[in-house]
Image (cartoon, grey):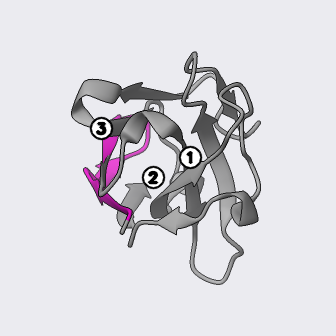
């Protein structure tokens, strides 16, 4: 059983920073590409960022590029999402997801490419 567990959400003012963490339990972390998605009330879940399990290549949604950074620590089986210069429109439930892929250079970006999902952690940004 593979289970991502998120932590680090909270309430901050616009312009501030938060770091989300996601620990992957149950399997060898190195075999999984990892991603972050978010869902605001009344909206569809949207892709935020992803990182390969090989070289750690990253990809970001345009809305967060230059402000958010995804990284991973394979020794700790943990992926991070550093969020800087937060905006009210970043408010959402942030979900970590894991994708087991045979290609260690491929960056998954679609929801159906990820087989394992966390419960989410809430981020609220006030103006």
Q: Residues within 10 Å of mark 1 (few under 14, many from 20)?
A: many
Mark seen at residue 55: none
From mark 2 to mark 3, how far is it between C-alphas? 34 Å
Indicate the position of residue 72 as horizontal and vertical percent values.
40, 28
Indicate the position of residue 106 as horizontal and vertical percent values.
74, 32
Q: Residues within 10 Å of mark 3 (few under 14, many from 20)?
A: some
Indicate the position of residue 50 as horizontal and vertical percent values.
61, 38
Where does label 1 land, which residue?
A: 35
Q: Secondary structure at mark 3?
A: loop
Could you tell me if residue 102 is visible in this image? Answer: yes
Q: Secondary structure at mark 2?
A: loop
Residue at 69% across, 30% down: 59
Where does label 3 land, which residue?
A: 77
Residue at 41% across, 66% down: 118
Between discs 1 and 2, the one toward the N terminus: 1
28 or 47: which is nearer to us?
Answer: 28
From mark 3 to mark 1, how far is it between C-alphas? 13 Å
From mark 1 to mark 2, how far is it between C-alphas? 27 Å
Q: Residues within 10 Å of mark 2 (few under 14, many from 20)?
A: few
Where does label 2 land, which residue?
A: 127
In the rendered image, the vertical position of residue 12 relative to residue 67, given as above or below: below
Tag 1 near tag 2, CB within 8 Å: no
Q: Which image quadrant: the N terminus? A: bottom left
Residue at 76% across, 36% down: 62
Residue at 41% across, 56% down: 126
Quarter of the image for residue 40 reads: bottom right
In the rendered image, the vertical position of residue 11 relative to residue 118, given as above or below: above
């Amino acid at each position: 059983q593979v289970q991502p567990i998120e932590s680090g959400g909270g309430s901050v003012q616009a312009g501030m920073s938060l770091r989300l963490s996601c620990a992957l339990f149950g399997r060898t972390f190195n075999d999984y590409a990892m991603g972050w998605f978010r869902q605001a009330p009344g909206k569809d879940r949207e892709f935020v960022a992803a990182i390969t399990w090989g070289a750690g290549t990253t990809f970001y949604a345009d809305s967060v590029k230059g402000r958010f950074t995804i990284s991973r620590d394979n020794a700790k089986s943990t992926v991070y999402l550093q969020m800087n210069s937060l905006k009210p429109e970043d408010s959402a439930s942030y979900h970590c997801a894991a994708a087991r892929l045979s290609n260690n250079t491929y960056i998954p970006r679609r929801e159906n490419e990820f087989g394992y999902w966390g419960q989410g952690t809430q981020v609220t940004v006030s103006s």
